[in-house]
Amino acid sequence: MFSLSHAALGKTFLFCSLLFPLGVVANDNGRVSWPKADSALKTDAATEQQLDALLAEMTIEQKVAQIVQPEIGYLSVEQMRKYGFGSYLNGGNTAPYGQKQADAKTWLSYADEMYAASVDSSEDGSSIPTIWGTDAMHGHSNVFGATLFPHNIGLGAARDADLIHRIGRATAKEVAATGIEWMFAPTVAVVRDDRWGRTYESYAEDPEIVAAYAGPMVTGVQGDIGDDFLSFYHRIATAKHFIGDGGTENGIDRGDTLADEQSLRDIHAAGYYTAISSGVQSVMASFNSWNGKRVHGDHYLLTEVLKQQMGFDGFVISDWNAHKFVDGCDLEQCAAAFNAGVDVMMVPEHFEAFYHNTVQQVKDGVITSARLDDAVRRFLRAKIRWGVFQRGKPSTRPESLKPEWFNAPEHRELAREAVRKSLVLLKNNDNILPVSPKSRVLIAGDGADNIAKQAGGWSVSWQGTDNTNADFPNATSVYAGLHQQITAAGGEVELSADGQYSSRPDVAIVVIGEEPYAEWFGDIQQLEYQHGNKHDLALLQKLKQQNIPVVTVFLTGRPLWVNKELNASAAFVAAWLPGSEGQGIADLLLTDSKGNIQYDFSGKLSFSWPKYDDQYLLNVSDAQYQPLFAYGYGLTYADNTRLAQLSEVTRAVPTQHSGEQLPLFVRNLADGLSWALTDSTTGPKTVNTSSAVSGDGKSLSMQSVNLAYQEDGRRFVWQTEGASATASLRYTSTQPLTVLGDSKFLQMNIRLDQTPSADVNLALMCQQKQCLRSVSLQPLLSSLERGQWHTIALPLPCDGAKAPQVVEEAMRLSTKQQFSLALADIALVNSLAQTTKVLDCGQ
């Protein structure tokens, strides 16, 4: 079931087998014992003497600057020169000079500017070079034109640690070509509930694969310990997110991991042991809590466990503004997280205030000098190991003089190999696969010619929802890969997203799947694919009813309940999120022109596949284990397995309104809801993306804004002149919403950006009719301060009538003139805070 080819894995498996069956071994404090990671990387006297000398010379201000990390969307070159920050980052939505499509040369030029500012001692008195950190999640994935490897969930199915090592090495080379020194990868989460929005960032549900992969990825990025370590093109790696991020209750991102300490060690720490053994220099703390306490503020986990017991001598980096969730902290100060063991604070926007407050906290003794020196020592140790004082300006480094490394042909071929090894064949009735390229092939589904969908989140942009094929200039869609091979062999291809065709095909290859998402935007409540709106199923069934054999290629970041889709397909392939190389899919699905198999399927599930739609917790170690496809399952062309008709009965209980709040759009859209932008001529345009424009291309636009979290709000801009345009929360299929009968208010946060010149109306719509009287927002909006967030509420039912049972649009805003506002935290609630502004139903 599990064959790994990296040479070091014999040691890895021996290590894992010795470590994790330890049982509950208590230390002197009655806690579980965490063994020390066995690493050949040791501190050396020369480096420690250099650190002693540096720390003796540095002022408090210079030390604090080393441990504050701003983000390039907010940091200027002048601020870098003034403060001399030890590092900086680019977030998932940020590129140099605000250019999403900036090329590698532009990234390198920006790195030069920041480097020069950091070593300029004219203002801060320090000349310690800064380093740049980036999320290289599946390749150098934030950079336009980079090679995109399959996301980790696909790599876990490949069962090939040598492949992981080579991907780490190739990614480091592409990162090096842009002048960046530090990667926030790999993710070594062990996922227990696939409803989590970051499931695809994990290699597996079982710690075995995660432990086996973490070391090879680290050595691929950083080099092997010894002369190769952090040399030439190798970058600083980060194991993340410590600890328990994959185990939160109900799969809620940044939630609470309710687990005993032995489970935390034996399951969730597996990847950290092998990463530390391989010399990883950075560990990122996790947003989640452990049994109610935020990890960012947990001294026991960060200092006593990670640094002292496990023996990690690198530095701990916080996650994006995660310190603000620690008790006693806010965006501008957090001594509690620093004292708990976070060494470098990722403070994207409020870094100046954070810097000044931290300096004062050191002077006041809230943070001790010893703790500050320890954090700076750890960070500078990693920078010295990388050679920051010797390497010079990014563009002059030997590795940066290799532009041919960026999207190199050999990297694309490696990614194509990874695609072939990651796909899992779940069904192949009547041996419909492989398909002859001499056939007449219909290629259907909205994922067929959609590189953004096959790449997923963390691809050029954070969520990946605003991308088109033009954002992936060096990539190949699934359709393009199939088209090239079929036409070369003399076959015929017709592309039709909706399945309409001009010539009856011999076979239909239908590419469907999840829309891109990242982090909490991907959290779901239901495991059923397209719950409430089964339009992809309708496409599959339509083709099946026409007696056209259907091969389904499923693009997904997790296993989902797809029994109905499986029944409608003759063959079904879990393609995960394969990245930029769609040709790898064609390599598996098609024979060569002579009818010979090009490549066989070798991928095996690293996540159990649900048999029922309510199997939220389904892992290979479960006592009651009843998957549809077990961990390790995956057919090959040699198998003659026929999948019988599957039950299509749903068991999951629909979400009911229990408690004080039913979220509609709180951080992300609730199940079954989409945004709808409607103009006067083209009708509603329904989207699940963070940005969009109405069908006429001008009347109404939507883009993401931040309230408490990244992209947790939406800003709407009306550009109409006399013709009504509407923004609404629309159910993707009309369904009973009985919860309205129990709710007292429709509540939302609102920010007025432009005062309206015409009336603005708020309503709820039921089956194309107003089911609650439209309420004018004009009196309220005229009293609001522009640019400030306010909480408002609409009483339900506003007109005293019986609340509706079937709702089409849970919120509808319309106006006929230019206007702009932002919305966040839209929910049905039963009680209000005293500061909430309640709308007058008589208006």
Image (cartoon, rainbow, N blue to C red):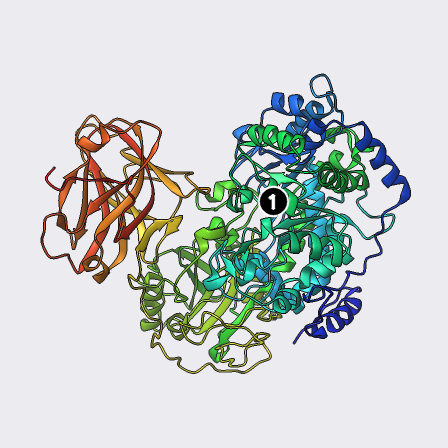
Query: Quarter of the image holding residue 381?
Result: top right
The structure residue drawn at horizontal position 60% and vertical position 71%, both measured from the top left corner, is 604
Q: Is residue 830 above or below residue 160?
A: above
Q: Is residue 718 above or below residue 518?
A: above
Residue type for callout 1: Ala
Q: Quadrant of the N terminus?
A: bottom right
Q: Is residue 320 above or below residue 625?
A: above
The structure residue drawn at horizontal position 46% and vertical position 52%, both measured from the top left corner, is 520
Label 1 neighbour load within 10 Å: few <14, some 14-19, many 20+: many
Q: From this viewpoint, is residue 590 visible?
A: no
Q: Is residue 73 above or below residue 430?
A: above
Q: Quadrant of the C terminus?
A: top left
The picture places residue 341, in percent across and down from the top left corner, at 67, 47
Q: Nearer the viewer, residue 727 or 515?
A: 727
Q: From this viewpoint, is residue 563 visible?
A: yes
The picture places residue 598, in percent across and down from the top left corner, at 62, 67
Furthest toward the top, the residue is: 122
Per the image, the residue denoted by label 1 is: 337
Q: Nearer the viewer, residue 365 or 284?
A: 365
Furthest toward the right, the residue is: 45
Q: Is residue 295 left or right of residue 86?
A: left
Q: Secondary structure at mark 1?
A: helix
Instruction: Count all numbered tags in the image, as a single digit.
Output: 1
The picture places residue 524, in percent across and down from the top left corner, at 41, 59
The picture places residue 273, in percent across and down from the top left corner, at 72, 61
Q: Nearer the viewer, residue 404 or 564?
A: 564
